């Protein structure tokens, strides 16, 4: 990491957040379901997926004293980070009062990767530099970005692995510049008819490529 980059970001604060996120005996709560995903879950129990219903559900989680004492950080969806509880308290404040760190999912899902049939690339980098300072001001101290790698006949291609690894690295650099800790999540899907050995081989290639891209962005020494 260059001296110029160190001047832009406060490494001590980033390290403090990162260490708190992996505190012994605690885990991260993923409350970042998209509107579409949470609707499916509400449909299964006969609940209409309105903005208030989604708020009430998540507020219930954040007010659970016994549950939240085991949570180090909470990943929020864009809708949720701006919401307030029924009593007017911002949901991010409920998370902080519970002793956890608010985080934010910043990727915008996946789209088909051009000229790579059956493969996906995660999108959302275009406006990320503008969005991150607003999330930080709202209380987010870490972020999440998920790159999806599928295994099948003839896939994943090197192009798919490189495209997703590069996106993860650019996202991580933007986060650190905005004083937000990035969770770098290259996910090799386990679903399929491939063997354990194939999964291990692809995972090794994906991780090596991601680390290489992180290094090229100045995130890793």
Image (tube, rainbow, N blue to C red):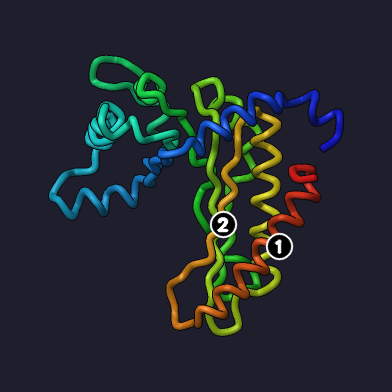
Residue at the image point whose x is 34% and y is 50% from the top: 36
Mark 2 neighbour density, 10 Å: few (under 14) some (14–19) many (20 or more):
many
Q: Cα distance, mark 1 to mark 2?
A: 14 Å
Dot 1 corresponds to which residue?
208
Q: How many marks?
A: 2
Please indicate whether residue 119 sits to the left or right of residue 89 in the image: right
Q: Quadrant of residue 205?
A: bottom right
Residue drawn at (56%, 66%) of the image: 149
Give the label on residue 147, or none: 2
Q: Give whichever of discs 1 and 2 has the lower sequence position.
A: 2
Q: Position of residue 134 (x, y in %)?
A: 56, 25
Q: Horizontal and vertical percent for residue 115?
A: 65, 73
Tell me if residue 170 comes above or below residue 67 in the rendering.
below
Q: Give the farthest residue toward the top.
A: 88
Q: How crowded is mark 1: few (under 14 residues within 10 Å), some or many (20 or more)?
A: few
The residue lying furthest to the right in this view is 3
Left or right: 41 in relation to 138? left
Q: Quadrant of the N terminus?
A: top right
């Amino acid at each position: 990491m260059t001296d110029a980059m160190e001047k832009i970001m406060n490494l001590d604060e980033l390290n403090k957040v990162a260490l708190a996120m992996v505190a012994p005996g605690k885990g991260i709560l993923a409350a970042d379901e998209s509107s579409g995903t949470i609707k499916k879950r509400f449909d299964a129990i006969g609940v209409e997926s309105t903005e208030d219903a989604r708020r009430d559900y998540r507020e219930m989680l954040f007010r659970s004293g016994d549950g939240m004492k085991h949570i180090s950080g909470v990943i929020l969806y864009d809708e949720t980070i701006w919401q307030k509880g029924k009593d007017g308290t911002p949901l991010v404040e409920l998370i902080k009062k519970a002793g956890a760190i608010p985080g934010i999912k910043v990727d915008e899902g996946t789209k088909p990767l051009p000229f790579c049939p059956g493969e996906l690339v995660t999108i959302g980098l275009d406006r990320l530099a503008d969005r991150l300072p607003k999330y930080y001001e709202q209380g987010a101290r870490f972020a999440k970005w998920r790159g999806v790698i599928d295994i099948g006949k003839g896939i994943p291609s090197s192009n798919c692995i490189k495209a997703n690894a590069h996106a993860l690295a650019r996202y991580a650099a933007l986060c650190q510049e905005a004083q937000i800790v990035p969770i770098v999540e290259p996910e090799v899907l386990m679903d399929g008819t491939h063997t354990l050995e194939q999964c291990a081989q692809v995972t090794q290639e994906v991780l090596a490529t991601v680390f290489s891209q992180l290094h090229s962005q100045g995130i890793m020494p």
